[in-house]
Image (cartoon, rainbow, N blue to C red):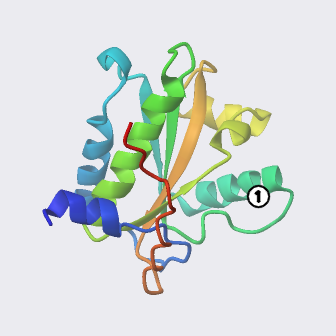
Amino acid sequence: MNETLKVLTERRSVRSYKDTQVPEETLQQILTAGEYAPSGMGMQPVVMAVVQDKETIRQMSRMNAAVMGNDSDPFYGAPTVVVVFADSRRGTCVEDGSLVMGNLMNAAFSLGVDSCWIHRAREVFQTEEGKALMKKWGLGEEYIGIGNCILGYGDKPLPQAKPRKEGFVIRA
């Protein structure tokens, strides 16, 4: 199996992290993969906000947990959070942002970095507190949160893949 297909079939979402930061050179390679994700008509309506400041991550974790109605850490202690935003004026903004998220996670795995897509970015960044963070980062309210890609090094073995469901592929 070639390396690309190996990454696509072996990558797993990790939900428990060491407190070890991703090296800058490795992080830059992951972000470059996100930048090169396909987008509708090549319009590139996506922006990635890279957060490594522990206090800001704690704030975003608290906000995300509030959307769920609890006080857990939805970021599982990951030392890096890449928030993917997309310009809502583009009809393919959700799809474009989702492709960036996929590229980030697959690139991370190819470089030995673990990841997980954490939802609720849209709800978090529709709040006044979320809008304040977006403003601080130079983003206007036309941007919507697509997802949070947490990055780091897992502190447990990778989870096993679930069996693929029957009927996943239909040959028409």
Does residue 144 lie above or below 48 as drawn?
A: above
Looking at the image, which is closer to me, 107 or 160? 160
**According to the image, label 1 marks what residue?**
65
User: At 64% from the left edge and 21% from the top edge, which residue is drawn?
Assistant: 141
Drawn side of residue 88 relative to residue 73, left or right = left
Drawn side of residue 143 relative to residue 27, left or right = right
Drawn side of residue 23 relative to residue 52, left or right = left
Q: Position of residue 85 (x, y in %)?
A: 52, 33
User: At 56% from the left edge and 72% from the top edge, which residue is drawn?
Assistant: 15
Q: Quadrant of residue 69?
A: bottom right
User: At 51% from the left edge and 62% from the top edge, which residue is drawn?
Assistant: 165
Looking at the image, which is closer to me, 124 or 21? 124
Q: Position of residue 17 (x, y in %)?
A: 50, 76
Does residue 136 lie above or below 107 as drawn?
A: above
Q: Quadrant of the N terminus?
A: bottom left
Q: Secondary structure at mark 1?
A: helix
User: At 71% from the left edge and 42% from the top edge, which residue is drawn?
Assistant: 124
From this viewpoint, is residue 129 visible?
Answer: yes
Q: Which residue in the rendered view is the most extreme toward the bottom?
A: 156
Q: Total of numbered circles in the picture?
A: 1
Does residue 8 lie above or below 97 as drawn?
A: below
From this viewpoint, is residue 23 visible?
Answer: no
Q: Residues within 10 Å of mark 1 (few under 14, many from 20)?
A: some
Q: Quadrant of the C terminus?
A: top left
Q: Which residue in the rendered view is the most extreme toward the left?
A: 2
Q: Amino acid at mark 1?
A: Ala
Q: Position of residue 147 (x, y in %)?
A: 56, 44
Q: Position of residue 76 (x, y in %)?
A: 60, 70
Q: Which residue in the rendered view is the most extreme toward the right?
A: 69
